[in-house]
Image (tube, rainbow, N blue to C red):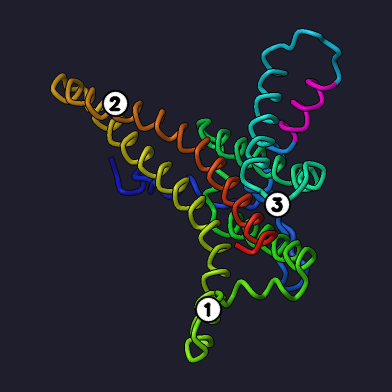
Amino acid sequence: MTLREIHSPLEQFSIVPLIPMNLGDLYFSFTNSSLFMLLTLSLVLLLVHFVTRGGNLVPNAWQSLVELIYDFVLNLVNEQIGGLSGNVKQKFFPCILVTFTFLLFCNLQGMIPYSFTVTSHFLITLGLSFSIFIGITIVGFQRNGLHFLSFLLPAGVPLPLAPFLVLLELISYCFRALSLGIRLFANMMAGHSLVKILSGFAWTMLCMNNLFYFIGDLGPLFIVLALTGLELGVAILQAYVFTILICIYLNDAINLH
């Protein structure tokens, strides 16, 4: 095997322009990342359309799946966001449901061979987290007015420490958006890279045409299968973690915790 045939495990995250578009110094190319985001959105919309258009009294498997996701996110919103009536909570529910569903399907379609993991790119997860973070901050000001800024200074703090604590709390608050995006990006990228490395190692041993290497390949092969199952669980877990943190941050903004 030559050096040209050795592929980096990070090549799977390369963004490839499919339809190059440049407007002056601005880059608007339609890339593989854009394509798979559109495919994910189309899949979700088609699933919801075909599930909701029927009037079956007995739900099929796909209807049960959509109802499970709906009930799961609804219970999450009701449990994590306090101090509001049910009708007010419903205003936030569609956004949280769409976010969870989008991330879940993006993570799961990234497990398909030769597909592209949209959430493995920092700019995409950071853009999503910062846009949600800005929305949560706007909700906080709408609900509490300028009193929303009181969370920067806990009650009973000595006056000489106030400037330091305000700065510290402000940095901590801004880092919520940063950590929200980094957590999703890092977990998805690390998991896929590890599976790629071990898969390449197992495939190389399998192609050695040697009985000793073939027997030795069984260990890495089983590890790859186990890591694939683990990565599938991580894909679902990260969508859940991202969503529950949105609910927690929203609750903090509304109730000034």
| Foreground of the two, 143 or 159 | 159
Q: In which quarter of the view is residue 35 placed? A: top right
Image quadrant occupied by the N terminus: top left
| Mark 3 surroundings within 10 Å by alpha-carbon count, few (fewer than 14), some (14 through 19), many (20 or more) | few
Which residue is the extreme one toward the left?
Answer: 212
SS type, badge 1:
loop
- List the residue tagged with mark 2: 221
SS type, badge 2:
helix
Q: Does the magenta stretch include residue 47?
A: yes
Choose mark 1 or mark 2, whichever is in front.
Answer: 1
- The secondary structure making up most of the magenta span is helix
User: Residue 163: x percent and y percent?
Assistant: 53, 88
- List the residue tagged with mark 3: 83
Q: In which quarter of the view is residue 39 placed? A: top right
Residue 99 visible to the viewer: yes
Q: What stretch is highlighted in magenta?
A: 42-52
Please tell me which residue is depicted at 37% across the width and 37% down the height of the picture.
195
Please tell me which residue is depicted at 51% across the width and 43% down the height of the picture.
238
User: Residue 198: x percent and y percent?
Assistant: 31, 37
Residue type, label 2: Leu
User: Residue 37: x percent and y percent?
Assistant: 67, 43
Residue type, label 3: Gly
